[in-house]
Image (cartoon, coloured by chain):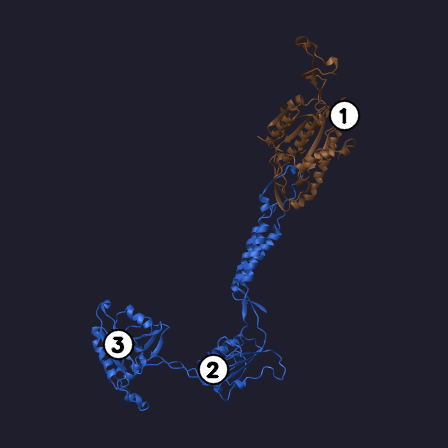
Chain colours: A blue, B brown
Amino acid sequence: MNPGLLFPAGLLALAGLLVPLLIHLVRRSELVVHDFAALRWLSARARPRRRLRFDDRALLAVRLVLIAVIAVLLAQPILTRWPGARDWLLVVPGAKPSAVPVPDDARPLERPIERRWLAPGLPALDSPMPAAGPSASLLRELDSRLAPESTLTVEVPSELGGLDGERPRLSRPVEWRVSSADSTPVEPASLPATAARPGLWLVYAPERAEELRFLRAAADAGGVIDSDTPESTTTGPVLDILGEIALPSNLNRVDWPTFGAGRLIWLSEQALPPAVVGWIQAGGQVLRVGVVDEAANDDSVLVWRSADPGSDVRAYTLGSGRLMVLAARLDPEYLPELLQPDFPDILRGWLQSPGPEPSRAPARSHAPDTGLAAWPPPSRGLGDWLAALIALLFLLERWLASAPGRLR
Amino acid sequence: MTTPDFIPPDVRARLKALRLRSRRSAQAQGFGLQSSRHLGSGMEFAQYRSYEPGDEPRQIDWKLYARSDRFFVREAERDSPLTVWLLIDTTASMGQTDAARPALSRLDAARGLAACVIELAMRQGDRFGLLSVGGAGLAVTDAATGPRQRDRCLLRLNALSAGGQWPEETSLRPLWQRVHGNAMVIVLSDGFDAHCVALTERLARAEREVLHIQLLTTDERDFPFRGGHRFRDPETGDELLCDGDAVREDFIQQFSKARAGLAARLAAAGVGHVEYLLDEPLDAPLQRWFGESRQHGALPR
């Protein structure tokens, strides 16, 4: 158990120790005049000594301790302590049960073995098999919470789900047992159904009507000519244009149709009306074309990079929907890709929802890596105890300070 | 208006065992006890009462018999053998209190002691009166006896306040007209004022029995001050800044010497001298002087 400070600069408050020292250094007792009729028997030569001297030592000590404790509280003290070292046996849901060793094995156990499912909450192995969770994330979390002496043994099915972009890097070696045969193959996560041909709503300012030509042409084009994906050549038009709306000057007069699952292409510099914003937040997707991307910031995601550096498409998350911004107008001068034959595919790529990220891998190739620096031990704040101590010290200080006859 | 009560109950209970007793002339009084207000033969007329069998014929007022044709006996109040005067110093130094008990001043103790003496004197039928000497000069409550006199004295005590210095000698002259010979004078003072001590000595030389009770605070005995303190003489206004720890030994030594010197001086003048410290019970000096063990004995300390 090691003490530590989260905010050592809080110890600067120890400078407050000077205050009670100064208070007690002032010789208040000399300011009080005592009536003393036997004055003539007092010798006048014994002047008060001029060396440093403190009144009320006990009270001064309590005040110093009080301020010191407050300073320590400001520095946010913690106690760091590893839990007891154990051997962990983790089973990823779906692993073959026969791979789980019998608890009371013949060999003596040096340390207790924790048997858990590698699932959210780490339920005990005795409980029924839970649903699989984010395995990599759970492994990393558990690794950060365990004492350095603890060992990890993980039973995994041959195909492991719940992964993320990186092989787990842990601070300790892991015994990675891959079941040869899976008892219950994990169902692949169902992909969200994406419309192969998203319907388009074109909303345009009247002066920009000629830009619609490119979109109509792209919608009418019979898909990309690609020998690798023959089905795309046979599906006819890749995009359906569900409606075209010319914007009047006053947006309030527009009677917005129900966009539903369609995509909206906004060819106007007017701001999006609240009805459209509400639709986006409910899950809609809008592509604004020819608008200077004022809100370009870190929240945006680059969807598509153009040959012209000023004509990228960036996307923002708005509620559960998506707002994409193309800074350039639909003009070949600014967007040379407009004239290329794969523009319909590019347009479809903009408007399609991003698919789920890959999260499954063969377990054998996804054994956790080691080499991460050791985690700091978990810590516990001491603020409550110190606050109680401060209250006690304050009461003691008040009691001492108000004791009768103190200023004698 | 209720009369103030300066005597705590426990002290009042212990007072029952005490008697004011004059050492000087106890056997010269002739009437024996000085205890009560007996009516009988004497110089001062008190009342007439009708004749009862057994009365001496010479007590009958024959002139009244001639006028009224009835026997009346002339009764006189017997002179009380003792008159107790309480001389209370009310100069500013009497207002000094203890640092430990700021509510109790020397003058408060003097009030309590005076009340005790008044209680004793009234119980014995002695006459008692009050003299207070302070910045306002001399104030006299004439000697008499009885509960009304006691209440009068207690009210006068209650009105006393400490202030000023010892007055001029001339303003004390009425004192000599009131305090006759053979009276007992109990001086309640701190004994720091040379004039007061001189007056005490003169009273003793003038055939008065004098008991000097010196009222001392515990600060003067223990000198509990630590560190630098500023002291002020309440009468002269002089101030002195000194270090308590440094001067304590010297002060206690000097002050003890002064106390012993005062006691020796008063003893030489024939004045009874008792010290009273403010943390003692109120009757302690009276027990020391009038108590059983001291009644016939040697000089008190």
Where is residue A5? Give x, y as percent.
54, 66
**In front here: A168 or B293?**
B293
Vertical arrangement, residue B74 with respect to residue B265, above or below: above
Measure how far apart labels 2 and 3 are at the Cα level: 42 Å
Where is residue B184? Give x, y as percent.
71, 26
Mark 1 residue element = loop
Residue A190 in view: yes
Q: Residues within 10 Å of mark 1 (few under 14, many from 20)?
A: some
* Residue that sits furthest to the right in the current view: B297
Dot 2 and dot 3 within a common chain: yes
Q: Are marks 2 and 1 in contact (CB under 8 Å)?
A: no
Measure how far apart labels 2 and 1 are at the Cα level: 120 Å
Q: Are marks 2 and 3 in contact (CB under 8 Å)?
A: no
Residue B198 in view: no
Vertical arrangement, residue A262 with respect to residue A70, above or below: below
Placement of the N terminus of chain B among the 4 image quadrants: top right
Q: Chain of mark 1?
A: B
Q: Which residue is mark 1?
A: B26
Measure how far apart labels 3 and 1 are at the Cα level: 135 Å
Q: Chain of mark 3?
A: A
Placement of the C terminus of chain B among the 4 image quadrants: top right
Mark in the foreground, 2 or 1: 1
Mark 2 residue element = loop
Q: Say whether disc 2 or disc 3 marks the residue closer to the N-terminus.
A: 2
Q: Residues within 10 Å of mark 3 (few under 14, many from 20)?
A: many
Where is residue A407? Give x, y as percent.
60, 46
Q: Which residue is mark 3?
A: A201
Q: Quadrant of residue A29?
A: top right
Vertical arrangement, residue A402 with respect to residue A4, above or below: above
Q: Which residue is mark 2?
A: A167
Dot 2 and dot 1 within a common chain: no
Dot 2 amino acid type? Arg
